[in-house]
Amino acid sequence: MTAPERAEQLRALYRAFTARDLDAVLAAMAPDVDWPNGWEGGRLSGHAEVRGYWERQWAEIRPLLRPTGFADRDDGSVAVTVAMTVRDPSGTVLSRETVRHVYRFSGDLVQRMDVEEAGTGR
């Protein structure tokens, strides 16, 4: 997959997340995906754990993630700079920040995602 194709794949993943289309998001992930639990802590493994995490999260908060930049890394991963706004169910803004999501792939599927502080590279 070319860099522009990979970027479009990730844009589609963010669009599906924003639409709360879990089936579309999970379809882009390997069955044994390794995913960070940024809300509760720790890591998740596989579609069922990721689905449950997002269902719990969306019952409590409304994250809006907007990708603003993509960078291919030498190790084959892709770093996505993301503007993140989190609201409570009534719409009150709880936080606004910029984060970096780093994706690793197995073929065309997301195998792992990590979160870095934007601007730190870690």
Image: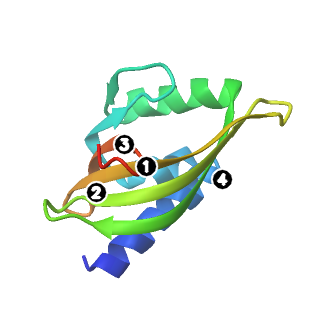
The answer to which image quadrant residue 54 occupies is: top right
Query: Are the residues at dot 3 and dot 1 in contact (C-beta closer than 8 Å)?
Result: yes
- The alpha-carbon separation of the residues under discs 1 and 4 comes to 24 Å
Residue carrying label 3: 116
How many other residues sit within 10 Å of disc 1, few (<14), some (14-19) or many (≥20)?
Answer: some
Q: Residue 55: percent from the left, percent from the top?
A: 58, 29
Q: Residue at x 45, y 29 (%)?
A: 38
In the displayed image of the protein, which residue is found farthest to the front? 120
Q: Answer with mark 3 or mark 2, whichever residue precedes in sequence.
A: 2
Query: Are the residues at dot 4 and dot 3 in contact (C-beta closer than 8 Å)?
Result: no
Residue carrying label 4: 19
The answer to which image quadrant residue 75 occupies is: bottom left
Residue carrying label 2: 109
Q: Residue at x 38, y 55 (%)?
A: 28
Q: Secondary structure at mark 2?
A: strand
Please state, as top left, top right, bottom left or bottom right, where the N terminus lies in the image: bottom left
Q: Is residue 42 above or below residue 91?
A: above
